[in-house]
Image: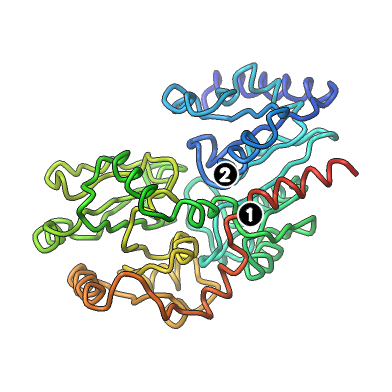
């Protein structure tokens, strides 16, 4: 870190701690998603619900300064992360609602309730459950300490299901309040899963309405990076082969993880493959997709709410499972779809789905019951009613 950045950070921290001493601003909420990089996920769903039902609340959204110009139009009170106005509002807000960690130096004032929604049901190990950390710029000991220190600041943690509740408690060493209500971000999968809304979304994405849609949404690899926090995509899916065999009936949407910084050049695959990595709301991508291809990403737990086909492209499962992260359960036995290792096998499974149908009637009931049983399109309402009731006590 340069001397100039160190000085700037010291000033930000000083101002933040000074403003924390001022009275809390009641009915004020600061939202943030994925380190300020998006207007998305659980915080977005809660923000929209509160905007529609509780107009007396002042709702602010925290954006990374690099995306602030392009995303600020989507919210009423956008703030650029770490500028003076952001520091003032953040330090005095009654609630913080975010889905990822805050900078290590941020701590909430006595009158601020810090609510962590997190961002997925975990397959891959988290926090202190990771045996050896392979991420750049840290050690296993430092990484785990950072995770547990952060979790101590949370007043409330949102869980989508009982399985996640147990994992979160252990992985984050978290012993504060957990509300197990389903995920607010998945409300849209119940409330907008109809032909009219799906057609509108296809038009927004500028994809052909007469083509089936395949969404490819892989996770990131801890040891495959450019710099700290900037990971490679290392696309293994053979798009040339996919295009050759599927272009008449399908388009492919490619959604990189938010930590991936790599530019994806899809020029050779115009009108077949679309880069939707910067599209904020992945749940809208779920809605327009007929098939999901993923690997070890938590996206498959959410997509399962739609009861549509999934294919697991797990070309490096031995390395990822045994060396990089480890899993909480046996994916080969429990995955709600086939595991494949080559593009040819992916295409073969797509052909099989064409024969068997895209809507899965006899879905994996046990999987759905384990991970999706709380989802019903009302999680945002349950969340807001809970925190406002708690506020009045």
- Residue sitting nearer the eye, 74 or 278: 74
Label 2 or label 1, whichever comes before in sequence order: 2
Where residue 312 sits in the image (x, y, percent)? Answer: 35, 69
Q: How far apart are marks 2 and 1 (CA)?
A: 9 Å
Image colouring = rainbow
**Would you place residue 96 above or below residue 343 in this image?**
above
- As drawn, is 102 to the left or to the right of 355? right
Find the residue positioned furthest to the bottom. Answer: 333
Pointer 2 residue: 45
**Residue 294, numbered circle:** none
- Residue 28 figure quarter: top right
* Direction right: furthest residue: 393
Count the marks: 2
Q: In this view, does 357 lie to the left or right of 7?
A: left
Q: Quadrant of residue 71?
A: top left
**Label 1 SS:** helix
Residues tagged 2 and 1 counted as in contact (Cβ below 8 A)? yes
Residue 182 place in picture, x, y as percent: 62, 59
Determine which residue is flagged by label 1: 379
Q: Residue at x 84, y 23 (%)?
A: 21
Residue appearing at x 62%, y 43% in the figure: 46
Q: Identify the residue shown where x is 29% and y is 41%.
A: 203
Q: Position of residue 380 (x, y in %)?
A: 64, 49
User: Depth check: 105 or 255 in front?
Assistant: 255
Q: Which of 357 and 347 is in front in this view?
A: 357
- In the displayed structure, 349 sits above or below 177; it is below
Identity of the residue furthest to the front in this view = 196
Element type at mark 2: helix
The residue furthest left is 244
Figure check: 212 above or below 71: below
10 Å neighbourhood of mark 1: few (<14), some, or many (≥20)?
A: many
Q: In this view, does 145 lie above or below 365?
A: above
């Amino acid at each position: 870190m340069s001397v100039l950045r160190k000085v700037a950070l010291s000033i930000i921290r000083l101002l933040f701690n000074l403003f924390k001493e001022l009275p809390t601003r009641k009915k004020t909420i600061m939202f943030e998603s994925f380190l300020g990089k998006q207007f998305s996920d659980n915080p977005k769903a809660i923000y929209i619900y509160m905007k529609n039902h509780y107009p007396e609340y002042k709702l602010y959204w925290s954006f990374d300064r690099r995306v602030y110009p392009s995303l600020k139009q989507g919210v009423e009170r956008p703030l650029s992360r770490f500028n003076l106005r952001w520091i003032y509002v953040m330090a005095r807000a009654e609630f913080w609602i975010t889905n990822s960690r805050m900078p290590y130096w941020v701590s909430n004032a006595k009158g601020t309730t810090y609510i962590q929604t997190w961002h997925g049901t975990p397959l891959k190990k988290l926090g202190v459950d990771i045996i050896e950390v392979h991420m750049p710029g840290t050690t296993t000991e430092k990484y785990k300490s950072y995770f547990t220190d952060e979790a101590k600041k949370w007043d409330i943690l949102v869980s989508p299901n009982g399985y996640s509740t147990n994992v979160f408690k252990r992985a984050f060493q978290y012993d504060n309040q957990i509300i197990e209500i389903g995920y607010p971000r998945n409300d849209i999968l119940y409330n907008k899963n109809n032909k009219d809304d799906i057609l509108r979304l296809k038009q927004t994405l500028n994809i052909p309405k007469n083509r089936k849609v395949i969404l490819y949404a892989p996770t990131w690899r801890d040891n495959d990076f450019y710099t700290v926090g900037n990971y490679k995509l290392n696309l293994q899916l053979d798009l040339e082969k996919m295009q050759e065999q599927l272009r008449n009936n399908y388009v492919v949407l490619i959604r990189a993880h938010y930590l991936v910084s790599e530019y994806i050049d899809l020029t050779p695959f115009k009108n077949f493959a679309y880069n939707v990595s910067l599209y904020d709301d992945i749940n809208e991508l779920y809605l327009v997709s007929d098939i999901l291809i993923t690997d070890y990403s938590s996206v498959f737990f959410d997509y399962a709410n739609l009861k549509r086909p999934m294919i697991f492209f797990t070309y490096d499962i031995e390395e990822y499972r045994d060396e990089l992260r480890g899993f909480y359960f046996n994916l080969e036995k429990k995955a709600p779809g086939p595991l494949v290792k080559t593009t040819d096998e992916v295409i073969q499974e797509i052909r099989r789905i064409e024969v068997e149908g895209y809507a899965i009637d006899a879905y994996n009931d046990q999987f759905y019951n384990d991970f999706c049983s709380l989802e019903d399109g009302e999680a945002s309402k349950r969340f807001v009613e809970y925190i406002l009731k708690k506020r009045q006590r």
